């Protein structure tokens, strides 16, 4: 167990979502706080996206969490509750980010994480994280949906505690992101756009906004728009997809675990599920990194692509407030930035150790320094 300490409440260091939102989460004095300082992520105004759409666009940058994805919000909760209930080992299926997060929080708590990932189908940064944090990692010769089925089966029949988002503690922790948005904006946005895989995060934001409305902190329920990759879009098609396919490996999921919850959230919020092809995902990835200054993994860029698509369809009125969640950091899966639109590799220019030669390559005319 980590050393017990209680940070001073007036410290400027963010204390993690369990401490910051203790009064609004299903925890008690008996719940240990297993935290790496998750949450408190920036909500960044995106002038370039506002200019493209006429809306007032903000990006909730969840790559700023301790393991580089939004999963940490749910994992602090799931691991804390697992420890409270005496678990010695936790298990999850993952497309990479959940496994990285489970591994980090479990090891911080002094318990074992077991992670099942689809063989050869997760980004190298995420594989590296799980191994770095001492998880028992098994590459399953199947897809994510197979991994989840096995993880659920093992958790039912063996002494391991499931920390996938079918565990309600995960969604409970993840809803805190909506609290942060309302705090910063002073109200809920008109639209909230998220990438969708298992649809746990879509469900969590809807829950968080619903609670804010009930508490009187906000005046409206945002329309929840969720986007799936075109080759992996069961919620758009209305049926599971047997062999989901997309470069956005984090959301390569054919049978979402939170299907029914997500349909309820869509109905309640006048929401929408849409599909985006890989080309448009990569275009949006580039726009976000090159025009806004935020580097994300491909799955996260689908929020941007979804905004542009819905804006072009005339659904987003001028002046509407739109929040896009970008779920995972670009450094987890950096290779996509090094490809040009035609699929060739970017080759950074090589220059000699020579000021004049470099000035020439840069097209700088000789003259006084700026
Ligand atoms: N974005 C990223 C970067 C993700 O890793 C995930 C899910 C999602 C979006 C979708 O969130 O499942 O709540 O709809 N990743 C899971 C994992 C499946 O194992 O890391 P969701």
Image: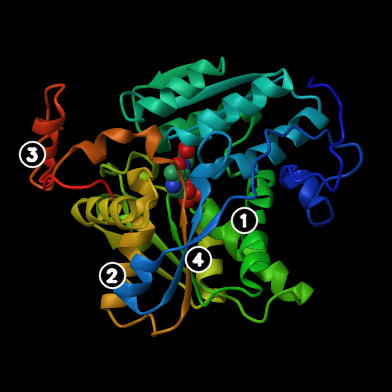
The residue where tag 3 is placed is: 360
Q: Nearer the viewer, mark 3 or mark 1?
A: 3
Q: Secondary structure at mark 4?
A: helix
The residue where tag 4 is placed is: 263
Q: Nearer the viewer, mark 3 or mark 4?
A: 3
* Nearer to the camera, 196 or 258: 196
* Nearer to the camera, 157 or 62: 62
In what quadrant of the picture does the N terminus appear? Answer: top right
Mark 3 or 2, nearer chain start: 2
Please provide percent x and percent y for residue 258. Answer: 53, 53
Q: Secondary structure at mark 1?
A: helix
* Nearer to the camera, 142 or 191: 191
Is residue 238 visible in the rendered image? The answer is no
Above or below 278: residue 316: below
User: Label 3 to label 2, Cα distance in Å?
Assistant: 41 Å
For the residues bearing labels 2 and 1, Cβ distance under 8 angstroms: no
Is the CB of the residue bearing disc 1 within 8 angstroms of ligand 1?
A: no
The residue where tag 2 is placed is: 309
Q: Residues within 10 Å of mark 3 (few under 14, many from 20)?
A: few
Q: Nearer the viewer, mark 1 or mark 4?
A: 1
User: Label 3 to label 1, Cα distance in Å?
Assistant: 48 Å
The residue where tag 1 is placed is: 177
Q: Residues within 10 Å of mark 4 (few under 14, many from 20)?
A: some
Q: Secondary structure at mark 3?
A: helix
Mark 1 or 4, nearer chain start: 1
Q: Is residue 369 toward the left or the right of residue 69 in the image?
A: left
Q: Residues within 10 Å of mark 2 (few under 14, many from 20)?
A: some
For the residues bearing labels 1 and 4, Cβ distance under 8 angstroms: no
Residue at image point 52% right, 61% down: 262
Residue at image point 58% right, 35% down: 66
For the residues bearing labels 2 and 4, Cβ distance under 8 angstroms: no
């Amino acid at each position: 167990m980590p050393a017990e300490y209680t940070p001073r409440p007036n410290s400027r260091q963010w204390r993690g979502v369990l401490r910051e939102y203790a009064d609004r989460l299903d925890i008690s004095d008996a719940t240990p706080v297993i935290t790496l300082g998750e949450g408190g992520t920036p909500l960044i105004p995106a002038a370039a996206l506002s200019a493209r759409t006429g809306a007032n666009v903000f990006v909730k940058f969840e790559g700023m969490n301790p393991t580089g994805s939004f999963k940490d919000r749910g994992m602090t909760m799931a691991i804390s509750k697992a420890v409270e209930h005496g678990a010695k080992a936790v298990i999850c299926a993952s497309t990479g980010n959940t496994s990285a997060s489970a591994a980090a929080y479990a090891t911080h708590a002094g318990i074992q994480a077991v992670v099942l990932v689809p063989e050869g189908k997760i980004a190298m940064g995420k594989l590296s994280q799980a191994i770095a944090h001492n998880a028992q990692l098994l590459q399953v010769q199947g897809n994510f949906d197979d991994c989840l089925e096995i993880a659920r089966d093992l958790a039912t029949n063996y002494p391991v505690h499931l920390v996938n988002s079918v565990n309600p503690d995960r969604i409970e922790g993840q809803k805190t992101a909506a609290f942060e948005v309302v705090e910063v904006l002073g109200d809920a946005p008109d639209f909230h756009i998220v990438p969708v895989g298992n649809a746990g995060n879509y469900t969590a934001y809807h829950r968080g906004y619903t609670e804010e409305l009930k508490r009187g902190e906000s005046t409206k329920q945002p329309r929840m728009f969720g986007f799936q990759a075109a080759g992996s879009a069961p919620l758009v098609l209305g049926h599971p997809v047997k062999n989901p396919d997309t470069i956005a490996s984090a959301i390569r999921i054919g049978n979402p675990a939170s299907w029914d919850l997500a349909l309820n959230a869509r109905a309640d919020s006048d929401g929408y599920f849409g599909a985006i092809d890989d080309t448009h995902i990569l275009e949006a990835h580039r726009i976000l990194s090159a025009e806004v200054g935020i580097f994300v993994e491909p799955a996260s860029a689908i929020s941007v692509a979804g905004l542009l698509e819905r804006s072009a369809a005339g659904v987003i009125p001028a002046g509407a407030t739109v929040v896009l969640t970008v779920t995972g950091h670009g450094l987890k899966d950096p290779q996509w930035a090094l490809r040009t639109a035609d699929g060739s590799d970017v080759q950074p220019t090589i220059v000699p150790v020579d000021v004049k030669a470099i000035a020439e390559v840069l097209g700088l005319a000789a003259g006084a320094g700026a």
